[in-house]
Amino acid sequence: MLTMQDKMNTRVHPQWVEQHFEWYRAAWIECGELIDHYGFKWWKKQEPDLEQVRLEAIDIWHFGMSALFVEGKSIDAIATEMETDIQAHQPSGEGVREATEALALNCLQTKGFSVSLFWDLMLASELDFDSLYTAYVGKNVLNFFRQDHGYKDGTYIKNWSGKEDNEHLVEVVDALDKGAEDFASQVYSALEKRYRELALD
């Protein structure tokens, strides 16, 4: 996933690591969006939308991984640090709101990203690693697909036949073998076929 994120960020800006973009800011703002889907208004009836909560967690993960990159540190070194953090961490057992707030607070205080606090959020939102990986790969491929089809210059069509591309992505991923070695390539090909059939017709 780190390698895929590096490729995506490089596609948008070749020297992205050296630019020191505020990835932590994007992460904590996504935390706010996540809580909005979970619900926080005690003064009105709200039902948590856990599917949307998990999708927001995937977006946080994109920005969070990006925040871990620094000049001179290899992807293998970052991965080792992530693994060490998770193994040493004692899960907090907090609920979705509390785990999200803890992660957002850490982003603001450190201007970085805590993998262990993200793990707490995953546990709270019932998101396991396999699901995180599958959803991440799908969204990463969609981001590349958008770039390849005019996202940056505004020519990309986001709604295909009455549905957003994110919805098409979910349907595409559900129909594929997530354990296949070429899973990412299959996702891209399936999106390409749908886009030509539904968006460009």
Image (cartoon, rainbow, N blue to C red):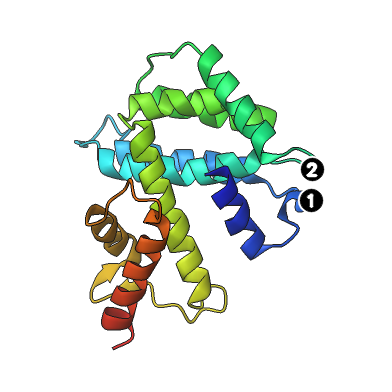
Among the 4 quarters of the image, the one containing residue 176: bottom left
Q: In front here: 137 or 26?
A: 137
Name the residue tied to disc 1: 18
Q: Secondary structure at mark 1?
A: helix
Q: Residue at x 43, y 14 (%)?
A: 91
Q: Residue at x 36, y 45 (%)?
A: 134
User: In the visual, does 185 lie left or right of 194?
Assistant: right
Q: Report if the CB atoms under discs 2 and 1 are less than 8 Å apart.
A: yes
Look at the picture and state if 37 lies above or below 160: above
Among the 4 quarters of the image, the one containing residue 110: top right
Q: Residue at x 34, y 50 (%)?
A: 180
Q: Amino acid at mark 1?
A: Glu
Between disc 2 and disc 1, whose residue precedes?
1
User: In the visual, does 120 lie left or right of 77?
Assistant: left
Q: Residue at x 32, y 73 (%)?
A: 159
User: In the visual, does 146 lie left or right of 196?
Assistant: right
Name the quadrant of the C terminus.
bottom left
Q: Percent position (x, y) of residue 165?
A: 34, 66
Dot 2, crowdedness within 10 Å: few (<14), some or many (≥20)? few
User: In the visual, does 11 lie left or right of 104?
Assistant: right
Q: Percent position (x, y) of residue 29?
A: 52, 43
Q: Amino acid at mark 2?
A: Glu
Dot 1, crowdedness within 10 Å: few (<14), some or many (≥20)? few
Q: Secondary structure at mark 2?
A: loop
Q: Which mark is residue 64?
A: none
How far apart, in angstroms, are the residues tagged by discs 2 and 1?
Answer: 7 Å
Q: Which mark is residue 71?
A: 2
Look at the picture and state if 107 lies above or below 99: below
Front disc: 2 or 1: 2
Q: Percent position (x, y) of residue 114?
A: 58, 27
Q: Percent position (x, y) of residue 7?
A: 61, 56
Look at the picture and state if 145 lies above or below 161: above
